[in-house]
Image (cartoon, rainbow, N blue to C red):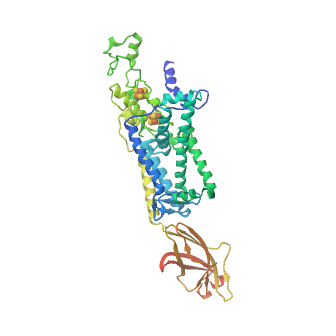
Amino acid sequence: MTETTDILKQEAFRDSVATISKEGRRNYINPKKPKGRLYNRRTWFSIVYLIIFFTLPFIKVNDAPLFMFNVLERKFIFFGMIFWPQDFFIFGIGMLAFIVFVILFTVVFGRIFCGWACPQTIFMEMVFRKIEYWIDGDSTKQKQLRSMPWNAEKIRKRTIKFIAFFAISFLIANFFLAYLISMDTLLGYMKDPGGHTGTLISLLIFTSVFFFVYWWFREQACIVVCPYGRLQGVLLDKNSIVVAYDHKRGEPRGKLKKNEDHDCKCVDCKNDGACKSINEKMEAIVRQGDCIDCFACVRVCPTGIDIRNGTQLECVNCTACIDACDAIMTSIQKPTGLIRYASENSIVKGEKLKINTRIKAYSAVLMLLLSLLVFLIASRTDLDVRLMRTAGMTYNTLPDGRIANLYNLKLANKTHKDIDFSIRLENMPGEIELVGSGRLLVKKEDYTNLQFFVKLKKENLSGWKTMLNLGLYEKGKKIKNIQARFIGPEVYN
Ligand code: SF4
Ligand code: SF4
């Protein structure tokens, strides 16, 4: 019975969610400002990250952006290379490789990405939260401000915070849009905002979404919305390195008593005289672990959880609890690292990272996909050509007796220069006649469709189906070979 009660007590944390009150309302988390070795490192890392984020849209290669993800026009640029919907399979393989990489990385290093590189965490913890500490003060002052009536101080602080949050959200929305449509296009729109009200409305919608997330939604984005967080349950195993509490060293936890010898293991208490009451003495006797139950790790947690309950979905591996606990351990003269990056196996069995079958299998799949991706990118051509006979048509017999087929030619120029080209029939005499007039030109980073007739003499046909070799030439130099089927009357078989 006692055992059951103990288990129920231990597992009681599963009955509630830190961010939801007993009444079912949102429990707003006001974490204490973290400080320490890892927080400093994360701050520096974030500065570099933000510089890159805000600089990349300005970088150009051959007059085109280095990165662009234009979903509306289905045009993507990675490292200056243009990808069209025709390259979808490369994109698909790239996405697959990325997913397998994320899985492999998570299996080995847990959610290290969330804490160090996820834009949500970087902007929330390293930009908006810092501004909040600066305007509202630390955790206690934030709580006081929240509960106080709307007096002059609250109105002033809330107004400053609102303006700052909205301005930064607007800035992020602009750069977000720059990644979609390119910085040049965005700057062009800014010069004439009246002519691009649709873009302005989208920009304000993006701004409102960012503002809503960073002002109010916050950690809920990681807990409720992010699919990566939800996947942790299946991706992590006992071998994965996560932010973990060393329960072997920390338990059984207990409050640190005044005058208590910190190194005392309490079973053979050397500090008998220092304990003032029998209760205190008894408490000191049962405590053997290093955790002094000070809750410093809980107070700094931006998702409001207690990492001592084990790895949880809410933990974004932000490392704030590591710093908080290290500071406590230092102050009570114990070794740091009671909370640290560690796997369950390393805590329980002292094992280092094991390259298990799961890791090997994911690595093999990843290598395979990466090799395929490299091959596809290396063999990809600058000019994508699709030639098809016009649907629903067979052939025409011309008044001079020649046979004509109508073709559709689709060209996608993946380079940063215009391509002025000509088409030649290579394996037999014949005529190519364009439908319409004008230059055969496909503009840089653009695509074009055109139609043309191929006219052949009957005696040159080798049956109802003749294979044609066509060449695409730019300034007299062949840039592409195309094969096409030419349909003629069956009688010439
Ligand atoms: S438990 Fe909280 S403070 Fe610790 S790493 Fe996870 S999210 Fe951060
Ligand atoms: S900060 Fe460390 S000592 Fe304090 S409660 Fe957390 S794990 Fe225990």
Note whether residue 212 is visible: yes
Residue lying at the far bottom of the rendered structure: 400
Task: Please name whichever residue, 21 or 199, is drawn nearer the observer in this view of the structure.
Answer: 199
Q: Residue at x 38, y 13 (%)?
A: 281
9 in relation to 359, above or below: above
Q: Position of residue 79 (x, y in %)?
A: 45, 59
Residue lying at the far front of the rendered structure: 152
Residue lying at the far left of the rendered structure: 270
Q: Position of residue 184 (x, y in %)?
A: 52, 60
Note whether residue 27 is visible: no
Task: Please name whichever residue, 294 or 162, is drawn nearer the observer in this view of the structure.
Answer: 162
Q: Quadrant of residue 245?
A: top left
Left or right: 344 in relation to 72: left
Q: Residue at x 56, y 62 (%)?
A: 85
Quarter of the displayed picture in which ligand 2 can be seen: top left
Left or right: 391 in relation to 273: right
445 in relation to 241, above or below: below
207 in relation to 439, above or below: above
Report the quarter where the C terminus lies.
bottom right
Task: Please name whichever residue, 35 or 190, is drawn nearer the observer in this view of the structure.
Answer: 190
Task: Please name whichever residue, 472 or 32, is drawn nearer the observer in this view of the structure.
Answer: 32
